[in-house]
Amino acid sequence: MPSSTIRSISITVSDDDGAAAPRRARAGRRKVVRSLGQRAVRLLARWWPILLLLPAVALLLFEASRLRTPRSPAPPVSSLGRLDPTTRLVHGVREPCLKFLSPKSIENLVFHGGSGLDALVRRIIYKSDEDDYDSYHPEANSTYLLQHAEATRFNLFTGFQTLPEREDSFKVNETVNVHCGFYSDNGGFKISDEDTRYMRGCKVVVSTCAFGGGDDLYQPIGMVNSSIGKVCYVAFWDEVTLSTQEAEGKVTGDNGMIGRWRIIVVKSLPFVDQRLNGKIPKMLTHRLFPEARYSIWVDSKYQFRRDPIGVLEALLWRTNSTFAISEHGARSNIYDEGKAIVHKHKATPEEVEVQLSQYCRDGMPDEKRLHGLKALAEASIIVRELTPLTNHFMCAWFNEVVRFTSRDQLSFPYVLWRVNMPGINMFPVCTRRDLVNSLGHTRKVKPLAQMNSDSSAA
């Protein structure tokens, strides 16, 4: 009996302990949770400003890391091949920058009879070493002439213009006698007989050049079918540019062509400064194409994208002009341009000072407009009728870039002021942008001095 009672009690006591244990465990957990919660609330109340600051600090660190990490530049969007017209806002209405005739109207165009300005200069005579033999250099020979030009860039190609001759060159008479390149047969800029014959057959010419490796050649676009047989597209290269382009797979055909362009390879460039060599086809088109009536110069960084005959109609015939050039987009004053040239390291301060000091002594006004035109031009596109008057203007301009800096935009206002040539159409920058696609310069030009040393080393 007693033993069974004890067994029963032990069993009963065991059952009660098993049920109470979970209850005690749950109560303990709740107590712990409440304790942790209270502690978390106290910590949050104490440290909440820092907790709010941490995300802001993390964001700043992230942005700083992005700024330090160099971003890959976005690929440039090429304008090559674009034909869409350039427009501008006029009184709130968007209009094309250049009002061009329709292709059908261009096909029916008859060449303009002239502006009537030819009477101002009827005849131009170009000085040569044959003319100057007795007058200037009794012992005339190449060695003497080169010694005479030691301190200048005048040479056997340019002739040796004196200051009195410079002064006379700006006078507009029925007959003018000026230096205008090609002074001596020994002066350089040699072109083959075959290319010379081709150039003599051109009546309308679009020209460009790339010397010393220079820029790539961009095929013209936008011409109408009727213009193709009327216009010569001519690119002047030297042998360095020819080999550079051939290495890139651009090889001239048996007819001397690459696409629409006739490639004229020039030998014996007369200047060390390649920029100055480039002024010869740019400014002396009338000397290179003696039978041509019209010319359009296009810098090598551009792709010409309009019909040449349509351009002549829009910029010359429609306005009764003989010479068209773009206004400068950034500056209007020759002295401001001089400062910009020095700032951009396009010429040395000493070179610019010499040029502008001479212009100041000559009485060049410090004005933004000359003879009713904006004083400063952007000379990457030049459209002109090849008359004695415009040829005279270009000769005077060329002699200035030889005498002073090669920056033709610095000498243009001076020549404009001195010659006061009528029939100039200075079109806005917007029009220039409509004529071409701008591709920029492809590669750095190789200096002629380096080219000569390379060839001698070889």
Image (tube, grey):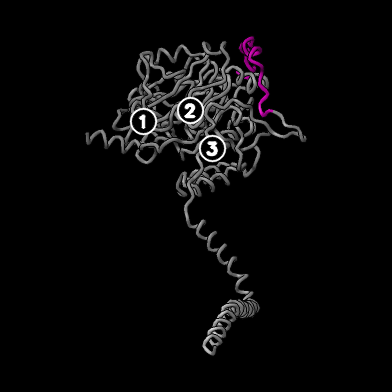
Which residue in the protein does label 3 denote? 409
Name the amino acid, label 2. Answer: Lys
- Which disc number belongs to residue 270? 1
Which residue, as the protein is rendered here, is positioned at the far front?
A: 1
Would you identify the image quadrant in which residue 143 lies?
top left
For the question of whether residue 265 can be seen, the reply is: yes
Name the amino acid, label 3. Answer: Gln
Is disc 1 placed on a helix, strand or loop? Answer: loop
Viewer-closest of 36 and 237: 36
Viewer-closest of 116 and 418: 116
Bounds of the magenta span? 96-118
Is residue 106 found inside the magenta-colored segment of the image? yes
| Residue under the image location 51 percent in, 36 percent down | 408
Mark 1 Cα within 10 Å, few/some/many (few <14, many 20+)?
A: many
The percent coordinates of residue 242 (x first, y second) are: 35, 26
Image quarter of the N terminus: bottom right
Is disc 2 placed on a helix, strand or loop? Answer: helix
Name the amino acid, label 1. Answer: Pro
Query: Which badge, 2 or 3, is on the more N-terminal residue?
Result: 2
Q: Is residue 34 above or below residue 292?
A: below
Which residue, as the protein is rendered here, is positioned at the far bottom?
A: 2
Left of 102 or right of it: where is 162? left
